[in-house]
Amino acid sequence: MSINKFWREQWIAKVYASAVELFHLSRKEPENAETPLSDLARQCANTVFAENAGTIVGDKEVVARAFMQKCREGFAYEIGKALVEDAQSSIAAHQTQEARVS
């Protein structure tokens, strides 16, 4: 593996982790309640990429394409995880409400 590829992969992993963190924080904010999760994921990925673009060493186009590919692959899982979390909290809230009524 070339040194450029190594650093590109490290950069992508770090920035992707930041994008995922921002996504999970942003989706819980009231102003994002109506935003589709796929749109929110894209917005978070774009925001974090733009904030960190100045730290790219090497070919920015190659890194951008690789980062977006990682986001397309990884955010599908994160969106599914968010949907499951939301469903579980909705079920728990419903069960709590039923317990109070009983």
Image (tube, rainbow, N blue to C red):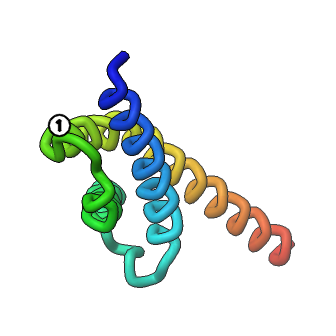
37 above or below 14?
below
64 above or below 90?
above
On the rendered image, what quadrant is the N terminus found in? top left
Determine whether the residue tagged by mark 1 lies in a helix, strand or loop. helix
- State left or right for residue 25 relative to residue 49: right
- State left or right for residue 42 relative to residue 96: left
On the rendered image, what quadrant is the C terminus found in? bottom right
Residue occupying the point 32% across, 27% down: 5
The spot of residue 64 in percent (x, y) is 20, 45
Quarter of the image for residue 94 reads bottom right
- In this view, the residue farthest toward the top is 1
Q: Nearer the viewer, residue 101 or 60?
A: 60
Number of numbered discs overlaid on the protein picture: 1
Q: Nearer the viewer, residue 20 or 88?
A: 20
Q: Amino acid at mark 1?
A: Val
The spot of residue 90 in percent (x, y) is 62, 63
Residue occupying the point 34% across, 34% down: 73
The residue at which mark 1 appears reads as 62
- In this view, the residue farthest toward the front is 3
Q: Is there any visible trace of residue 36 in the rendered image?
A: no
Residue occupying the point 70% across, 68% down: 93
Q: Is there any visible trace of residue 5 in the rendered image?
A: yes
